[in-house]
Amino acid sequence: MTAKKLSVSEDLDGQSFRQAVSLFATGIGVISSEDEDGNIHGATVNSFTSISLEPPTIMVSLKPGKMHSILAQNGCFGVSILGENHQDYSAYFSRRDFNDAPPPEFTKRHAYKTLADAIAWFECRVDKMVDVNDHTLFIAKVTACGRSEPGSQAPLLFFASKYHHNPSPIA
């Protein structure tokens, strides 16, 4: 198999980049935060990354929109890592039309709400916002985190623009 190479003079288009970067397998998370009226909002992301252990710091990348505005305004949010049985949660928070589906259940473990049955969760306070082209990187300190019972559920994975399930959860 031969990889297609781009010459320096060739323009890199967004679709080619999307196809190539889709081959980097990621987990799926839901970012959640409350608006000024106390309503919980969520957004599906696969751009969640740990940055530092000391202090615990993470990064999420968001395009301008409702969740971006809420995070920029209130500076705090939750991250819920989805398990193999949560594909419907990912779909719920990634589309604009919810088709009257009931919202997933959130819980407040310490200060901020996360999905009640997430396989891992993080409560975060925004430390820095960095604009990069059409996205903003929200760099945040983790104020609390936890996980479900080890081995109880494998993660929901995203690879080649499709969901995949890990065959064996870590014990």
Image: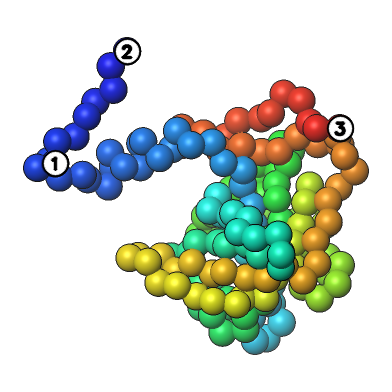
Residue at mark 3? 171
Counting residues from the start of the chain, the first of labels 2 and 1 encountered is 2
Residue at mark 2? 1
The answer to whether mark 2 and mark 1 are in CB contact below 8 A is no
Q: Please identify the residue farthest to the left as the structure is shown.
A: 9
Measuring from the top left, give residue 158's x and y in whole percent: 55, 38
Q: Amino acid at mark 1?
A: Val
88 to 25, vertically: above or below: below
Per the rendering, the mark at residue 8 is 1
The answer to whether mark 3 and mark 1 are in CB contact below 8 A is no
Alpha carbon distance from label 2 to label 1: 22 Å
Per the rendering, the mark at residue 166 is none
Q: Given this view, does label 2 or label 1 mark the residue nearer the observer?
A: 1
Counting residues from the start of the chain, the first of labels 3 and 1 encountered is 1
Residue plotted at (48% across, 37% down) = 24
Measuring from the top left, give residue 117's x and y in whole percent: 82, 51
